[in-house]
Image (tube, rainbow, N blue to C red):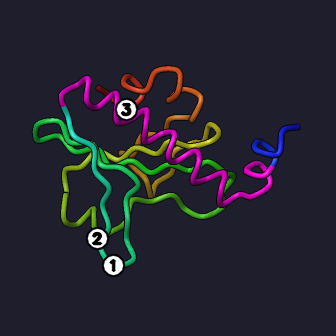
Amino acid sequence: MNPFVRKPLKDKVLWGRMIENTVGAKLFSSVQEAGGELFYWRERDDEVDYVVKIGKRLIAIEVKSGLYSEMLKIPSAFTHRYENTEHLFIIRDARKNNEKNAGARFVTLQHFFENPGKSIGL
């Protein structure tokens, strides 16, 4: 196997960054086609991977490329500041929603890359 491919597969942090950046590139082109804007948001230790703004509509997007055991959530500082935001998780594998993420949508990486605009609701 090519070392360029082997290293990211072994390094989970590098792999996660590569997936997150690839999602960002797809988001950027899809959002531009829809006439929207794409942002990153951070306040102290809270951050949101991507925020899509189309008109008054906001979609907070978190990208999770690995297996995870922790609760998926949009940072509380963002949720409090922008109460009517839609929450979307782009995740590695299908996962059932849970009560802590009521109202959030989950999309697999595969589904997102097959149709990015439709996956995020554009």
N-terminal of the two: label 3 or label 2?
2
Q: Amino acid at mark 1?
A: Arg
Report which residue position mark 2 lands on: 77
Q: CA distance from mark 3 to mark 2?
A: 22 Å
N-terminal of the two: label 1 or label 3?
1
For the N terminus, the image quarter is top right
Instruction: Give above or below for 31 relative to 4.
Output: above
Q: Which residues are drawn in magenta?
A: 7-35
Residue 44: numbered disc? 1
Secondary structure mainly formed by the magenta segment: helix
CA neighbours of label 2 inside 10 A, class few (<14), some (14 to 19), many (20+): some
Q: Which residue corresponds to the image point at 24% horizontal and 49% vertical from the top-left?
A: 85
Give the SS element for disc 3.
helix
Report which residue position mark 3 lands on: 120
Q: Is residue 108 left or right of residue 68?
A: left
Asked if the residue at tag 2 contacts the one at tag 1, i.e. Cβ–Cβ closer than 8 Å, the answer is yes
Q: Amino acid at mark 3?
A: Ile
Asked if the residue at tag 2 contacts the one at tag 3, i.e. Cβ–Cβ closer than 8 Å, the answer is no
Pick whichever, 76 or 9, lies toward us.
Answer: 9
Residue 110 on the magenta segment = no
N-terminal of the two: label 1 or label 2?
1
For the C terminus, the image quarter is top left
Instruction: Give above or below for 16 relative to 25.
Output: below
Q: Amino acid at mark 2?
A: Ala
